[in-house]
Image (cartoon, rainbow, N blue to C red):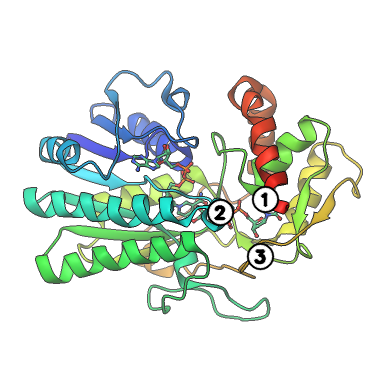
Amino acid sequence: MKRLLVTGGAGFIGSNFVRYVTTIEPDIYITVLDKLTYAGNRENLANLTQNVELVIGDICDVSLVEKLVPVNDAVIHFAAESHNDQSLDNPSLFVQTNIIGTYTLIEACRKFNTRYHHVSTDEVYGELALDDPKKFTPESPYNPSSPYAATKAGSDLLVKAWVRSFGLHATISNCSNNYGPYQHIEKFIPRQITNILCGTKPKLYGNGKNVRDWIHVDDHSSAVWLILTQGKIGETYLIGANGEKDNKAVIDLILELMNQPNDAYEYVTDRLGHDLRYAIDATKLEQELGWQPKFTDFRKGLFETIMWYRENQQWWLREKEAVEREYMNRKK
Ligand code: NAD
Ligand code: TDX
């Protein structure tokens, strides 16, 4: 593969993926297609100008997509509306980008016979009970809870149908919760780090017992690269690094690593439909493709993430007030 089209490459995971590929395969030419919504930022691609081009545009724009797809060897589709809280406020944007956008891309890949990788989430499987010994596997039934998760589930199902009915050369990955640099400050971990840096208390939804399965974004990138280059067409791979933690434990660790008193946080109103627990069984990816996560020390990864937000205040500070205002309005 010499030329890749990466949708959503100016967002959190997409930009980390682009950086990862430019490091391991410096000769590959990457075109990023990104609408630069509030979650996209051209600064995420700064210093990556050689062999990386940003095209500002919408994945729902058929003529633009049909121009870009045939001149690339593969499409890696990260673009999405990605925040559950936003999806409760404005589901229509999620239906448009996550479903119509995916449909537009796979139709173009079908037309030009282009390799397609679909980036998705463990949230399509719904929630697990806190005491359930099971984790999600590729055979788990789809049971999404939020508008975000439902639109991601819908997009996965479109891809599966295009593989079966039209022979689309596609793979799918469903990954657990990512953390690391360049994550938008609306999301849990960066929101709490930047709250502390601004002198406000971290906010814990509900009783803080909801569990997420954390993975470092660079481990997600290495897994997607492996699936793209060695995965079996038509297959779904689950990506996770055995990182289950409840939200209270994550807040406790952030407070400790940032030298705050251990009670310097507050409980706030819970999210509607808040899933209790996600957990990924990545055995298939490990056994069939030999993938292993590298960032298995969560404490170290979290500390480095905290340092990144400390050192890159110009990246997030100007948006902080507006993001928190939106959270306040949501509560009303
Ligand atoms: P993000 O919100 O940080 O980035 C999304 C990017 O997509 C932004 O740059 C945005 O400008 C772009 N975009 C949005 N709508 C677009 C459109 N219509 N056309 C073109 N570009 C558009 O999201 P993220 O956290 O980096 O997630 C990336 C992908 O990974 C998503 O598909 C998400 O569902 C999936 N995922 C995320 C996580 C996680 O923990 N964040 C976990 C598993 C899977
Ligand atoms: O202020 C907060 N307080 C809090 O307790 C926020 C923003 C969140 N939470 C809780 C809700 C979740 O249990 O923290 C957990 C993580 O929340 P988010 O960062 O919003 O992530 P989540 O809803 O789990 O979804 C994320 O992982 C799966 C990504 O946003 C999705 O794009 C991905 O598919």
Residue 330 disc label: 1
Cα–Cα span, label 3 and label 1:
23 Å
Residue 234 disc label: none
Residue 212 lies, with reference to residue 308, above or below; the image says below
Quarter containing the N terminus:
top left
The answer to whether residue 212 is visible is yes
Q: Amino acid type of disc 3?
A: Val
Q: Residue at x 34, y 66 (%)?
A: 154
Q: Are marks 2 and 1 in contact (CB under 8 Å)?
A: yes
Q: Amino acid type of disc 1?
A: Arg
The residue tagged 3 is 211
- CB at mark 3 closer than 8 A to ligand 2? yes
Q: Amino acid type of disc 2?
A: Asp
Q: Nearer the viewer, mark 3 or mark 1?
A: 1
Residue 54 lies, with reference to residue 84, above or below; the image says above
Cα–Cα span, label 3 and label 2:
23 Å
In the rendered image, the residue lying farthest to the left is 112
N-terminal-most mark, 2 or 1? 2
What crowding class fits label 3: few (fewer than 14 Cα within 10 Å), some (14-19), or many (20 or more)?
Answer: many
Element under label 1? Answer: helix
Please provide percent x and percent y for residue 114. 13, 49
The residue tagged 2 is 89
| Location of residue 3 (image quadrant) | top left
For ligand 1, give the image quadrant: top left
Q: Residue at x 67, y 76 (%)?
A: 130
Q: Residue at x 42, y 34 (%)?
A: 15
Q: Residue at x 35, y 49 (%)?
A: 97
Front-most of residues 225 and 208: 208
Element under label 2? Answer: helix
| Location of residue 326 (image quadrant) | top right
78 sits to left or right of 263: left
